[in-house]
Image (cartoon, rainbow, N blue to C red):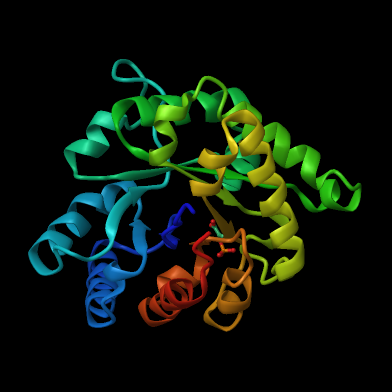
Amino acid sequence: MTQRRPCVGGNWKMNTDRESAVALARAVANAAQEHKLEQHADVFICPPFVYLDAVRLELEADAPEGPTLGAQDVSEQPNGAFTGEISSAMLQDLDVEMVLTGHSERRHVIGETDDVVNAKTRSALDAGLMCCLCVGETLQQREAGDTDRVNETQVRAGLAGVGAHHLDSLVIAYEPVWAIGTGRTATPDDAQAAHAHIRALLADLYSPDLASGLRILYGGSVKPGNAAELFAQPDIDGGLIGGASLDAEGFIAICQAAAQTCHHA
Ligand code: PEP
């Protein structure tokens, strides 16, 4: 039977400054070490691009076994005249191991299409980064009964051309748009239903074996108080955490809930 190691990511979005980013990273790393989290779960943090290096130096100095470094976005281009963009190689130069693609704020606020999300996902995976592909429906789509169709479209499009050999480096995050940053959380049953649907689709796209090894994280107003019941669902393998990842203690409590309650297939 395939084992799925719990995984929790912190998406700091456009928050913190240099000093508070370094302090938050240190606090997360210290708490992770204290609770020996690395024995039970993968933890990554995604500071703003401009603080990645400062956070990296802090983690390397103080916490070699602490959380790994992630980035909130990546360019699909390798280099060249793309003002403001950041390439996979630049991120790897800063020891970044994970990137988010398709986050709902990039889809719905910045306007990234499925094609752009797919190009970024493929480019990051080809470069050797781990990739967390985010998908999820809007409130209107959920109310219209379109949840599964939307997730299916986004997963199919996001993974077009992604070979099975890349699946070890892939994590999916199901993040219903209406639950992100709103304080509204999907019920554990609703989240589980969406995760199970996505896993069944992955079984179709790749194989049942590969799908059962892939981690699918839930994201959307996860907090210390609701994490355990979400992570206890059989197809929920951890979380992508926004607001609550800005508080080290709360974030670590969520990571501990994942380490203790996530299903290990
Ligand atoms: C996110 O940004 O991916 C997220 C889930 O945010 P929040 O936890 O604040 O809803």
Where is residue 155 shown, x and y percent of the image? Answer: 63, 35
User: Number of callouts in the render?
Assistant: 0
Where is residue 207 shown, x and y percent of the image? Answer: 58, 34
Where is residue 139 shown, x and y percent of the image? Answer: 80, 53
* Viewer-proximal residue among 116 and 194: 194
Residue 226 seen in render: yes
Left or right of 134 on screen, residue 252? left
Q: Work out whether 139 lies above or below 79.
A: below
Residue located farthest toward the top when viewing the structure as drawn: 80
Left or right of 20 on screen, residue 230? right
* Viewer-proximal residue among 245 and 118: 118
- Rendered residue at 35%/62% (across/down): 43
Q: Quadrant of ligand 1?
A: bottom right
- Rendered residue at 55%/45% (across/down): 103
Where is residue 188 shown, x and y percent of the image? Answer: 70, 69
Left or right of 99 on screen, residue 135? right
* Viewer-proximal residue among 25 and 187: 187
Left or right of 205 on screen, residue 53? left
Q: Work out whether 227 lies above or below 102.
A: below
Residue located farthest toward the front when viewing the structure as drawn: 1
Quadrant housing residue 208? top right
Residue located farthest toward the left when viewing the structure as drawn: 61
Residue located farthest toward the right when viewing the structure as drawn: 144
Q: Work out whether 42 lies above or below 171.
A: below
Quadrant housing residue 252? bottom left
Residue 113 seen in render: no
- Rendered residue at 72%/36% (across/down): 152
